[in-house]
Image (cartoon, helix red, strand yellow):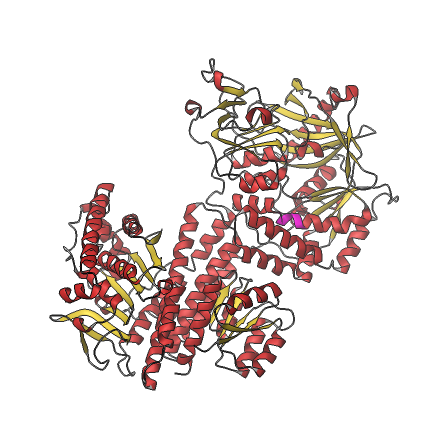
Amino acid sequence: MQAIFNAISRFISKPTDGKDDSSERFLARCDNFRLLLAANNKALEIMAEMTEESQSGSLFGMSHVRGQSLKVAAGVRQMIERLCRMNPGKYDALKDTFNRIVLEMETAVVDHADRQQGPLVLALDEINAESISEAGSKMALLGEVCGELGVRVPLGFSITASAFRLFMDSTGLDDEINRLIQITDSIELDELYALEASIHHAIDLAAMPQELKEAIETGCNAFSADKDTVRLAIRSSALGEDSSEASFAGQFLSVLGVRPDNVLESYRSVVASMYSATAMTYRLSRGLREDGVIMCVGCMEMIDATAGGVIYTRDPVGKHEDALIVSAVPGLPCAIVDGTENADTWVLDRESLFIRKAVIVDKKWRHVVSATGGTNKERLLGNECSAPSISNDVVAWIAGIALRIEAHFDCPQDIEWAQDHDGRIFILQCRPLAVCEVQGEPESLPEIDKNAPFAILTDCIPSSPGIASGHVFMVETDEDMLRFPEGAILLVRTAKPRLSALLPKAAALIAEFGNATGHLANIAREFGIPALVGAPGAVDRLSRVGVVTVNAKTGTVYLGRRDDQMPGSNRIQVAPRNNEVVTALCRTLQFITPLTLTNPDSPEFAPENCVSLHDITRFCHEKAVAEMFRDGDRPGAKARRLVDKGPLQYWLVDLGGGTSVSNEDEYVDLRCVTSNAMRALWVGMTTIPWEGPPPVDPGGFMSIISEAAQNPSLAPGMANEMAERNYFIVSRNYCNLQSRFGFHFCTVEGFAGDEPDRNYAFFQFKGGAADKSRRMIRARLIADVLERQGFIAEVRDDALFARIEGVSKEAVERALAVTGYLLVHTRQIDMVMFDNKACQKYRDKFDTDIMVILNLMQNDNECSSNWRRES
Amino acid sequence: MKKIRLLLVDDESDFLSVYTRRFARRNVDVSTAATGKQAIEAVKSTRFDAVVLDVMMPGMSGIETLKKIKAIAPDIPVIILTGHANSEALIQGMGGGAFDYMLKPVGTDELYFKVLDAIKNRLVESD
């Protein structure tokens, strides 16, 4: 679009050969009018984009929604400004209307988080389930089980939501982070990595408020007096984290083994982890709002664990009925959740706590708290490798605790635990567990697997159910992550949580190490992606094998695509349509897209009755055309009527060089038009006569009746005068046609000069009388025809935007002829767009006719000779 | 054609250097200012054809700067270009006489053509 205005600007900037002041002003007024049209087109284009985004399921965040709505608003405000310039003072009321609508729109999407200022830190014994808005779910639930159930939890405190807001607001980080997200406006992983680095840098540089520093230091005083030996776990407890719909499992940072004097730096790191590329991808994929995210942070004494693990109070995959699953590793449980080690697993009956099944794996490492900070890995020796991480008694004990927690919260739980050297069990966190439906008969297999000869990996433990097929792509490095193709099977050695950034693109996940209770498996279940986590030999057997089929019901991987295994995709909609971001977008659209101001002749057609930005565009467009072409008292402002054999319903404004007669005449003869762009357009419009409206099928007729009932401007007798006039604005190489043919609105514009870089043709088309689906089919049909003629065309809803740029003068002339033809010949065909056959009929006719017109133009060699014949 | 004299006002030095280079290739004579105060000094001493102005800057805000620029030279078109999607800035900026409000990221061509539009539109302002 910018090329359009550049071309015009260039034209207008040319010397005017002694034109007087009034001509100069007239040209400037034309320019002002074009700016208004440009702003109108831009605003409508973004409105159409937003409408499509609200329906398409594509991924975007709140910064995109805000950016888009502000771009529409800026375009509309630009229209108001241009209209006000046309007649100072007359339309000023629009500005107030605009301000009201925009502010209401802003208020409607504000995240209504409780912003009351509270304490900066809260001790764990002050926290319970009511404290979620300050302490976040993770810490609040921990406080709850400690206080209400007497369950043992580590000593600790929460750095609250209020603390986070203080940090963000007092340092300006809030604005800066929003700015960085806004200017990135991308969902591509490589750009999100760059964004992550920028945000982390900004957070690193931000000064920690003194009162927050002091509050955290005071919190740390509650720990053991020996500051040299105590080590802390600094854990994320973000608002919205750990819900059953969005666990954010492993998305945010936990820093382990932190010395008390390093808590502030770790706090900074945990806050920054909200903006990791992985977390941003997760939010985008789940349709969760990134604005207003709040990171509460838990600060807890580390348990020097002899063993630790995870308990699921139900089987999340739905394979084991009425079962509780305990997993454990020697040392700290972090090795389970971050997927670095395979774990021992017990399946228990929920009623009797009888151990139905125990899988004791070979283990190599134990993670321990390091004396110098952080954690260390220690190699396991001798029997330690094969011995169970905990005894059956301990398994039953922690299972009992887990069931009490589940009963308290009345929903299945995912619980992390640790046992210390004194044998005490500590609960480190608990959160709701999403449970898949039971997959048919529990643990049943088909009697005969006819694909068995193709099985290359069997007996893997399913971590997320489902079946999928695709190319295996092994990811080992960050570079591999960036190259990961859409729809591939993600093969990894270790089920690291950061790999979750790839899950929205992956057909299935296979990890050699890790287990079903780890974070990555958790996210795979949320995304509905089949996953086998903890699949021994997977990397060796699956690397470079090409296409495989993953059956995560039976734990089998087959070579090639096994169609009979595929029951149709069971993948859930990753970003459900009613997600937070789409909901906010729809709320925004209520202030943008509804068109209520439809009848320009009605007394209701007034600024104060505009209820949406679309209404304002409609009002501005209507009034601007009137100001530009009707107001004859302004010098040179009068458009001249085109005549051929008699007067036509077309008016023309010549910016210079577009006609061979004086601007003062009331009429201009077609033969006097010298604008090559308009001539080409006219050739397209007139070479093949329009056959009249298509014979309407009853459905199409009903469709138009019903549409007219909803839209008063379509009703008989309501057609306004504007509908009958079409305006050409022309210069030597330029033509712009604003038209309303029947019920649809069109803009055609083109510049066809000697420099290809500056040339373009543009076609915008919207509306119609039939119902929306028929209008959409017509728009798509026209787009197809234009694309075959070299246009880049986009259809959004029932609006079509097509352009061709940087081509020769002759190519633009041909393009304009094509648009001229389509302008005339697609009239009312929306009413017969009821099936493929009808579409195909018109497609064939259009292609043939266009070929005829283009051949004629070519044979005549010059548009001008063709022109002479037509005129 | 006479060179366009453009003032870019932004506290982001990378933005200033990148766009100065890009505009120079389009035969635009670019001056830069990192703060509102610097921008006002520049406007006092030089007759610019247009100003591209950031909103969030340390010290004087873009909106405040706009007001002062308009007080000094009412007919200089000012284009607001910001990374902060904020409707208040849009309302105040346009209400304060800005020619247009644009959001970053913006393509060089898009900004360049906007500057051309703004300069051409001055004729209407004086109509």
Q: Position of residue A11 (x, y in %)?
A: 35, 73
Residue A253 versus residue A655: which sits nearer the camera? A655
The relative height of residue A597 versus residue A297 in the rendered view (above or below) is below
**Magenta region, mostly helix, strand or loop?**
helix
**Residue A274: in magenta span:** yes
Count every numbered label the image shows and give the total.
0
In which quadrant is the N terminus of chain A drawn?
A: bottom left
Q: Quadrant of residue A48?
A: bottom left
Residue A179 versus residue A484: which sits nearer the camera? A484
Q: Position of residue A8 (x, y in %)?
A: 36, 71
The relative height of residue A267 versus residue B17 in the rendered view (above or below) is above
Residue found at x 67% / y 55%: A201
Q: Is residue A422 visible?
A: yes
Residue found at x 61% / y 57%: A177
**Residue A585: in magenta span:** no
Residue A134 versus residue A797: which sits nearer the camera? A797
* A112 relative to A701 in the view: left or right: right
* A516 relative to A853 in the view: left or right: right
Residue A237 versus residue B80: which sits nearer the camera? B80
Q: Position of residue A744 (x, y in %)?
A: 26, 59
Q: Residue furthest left?
A: A645
Report the magenta residues as a range: A272-276
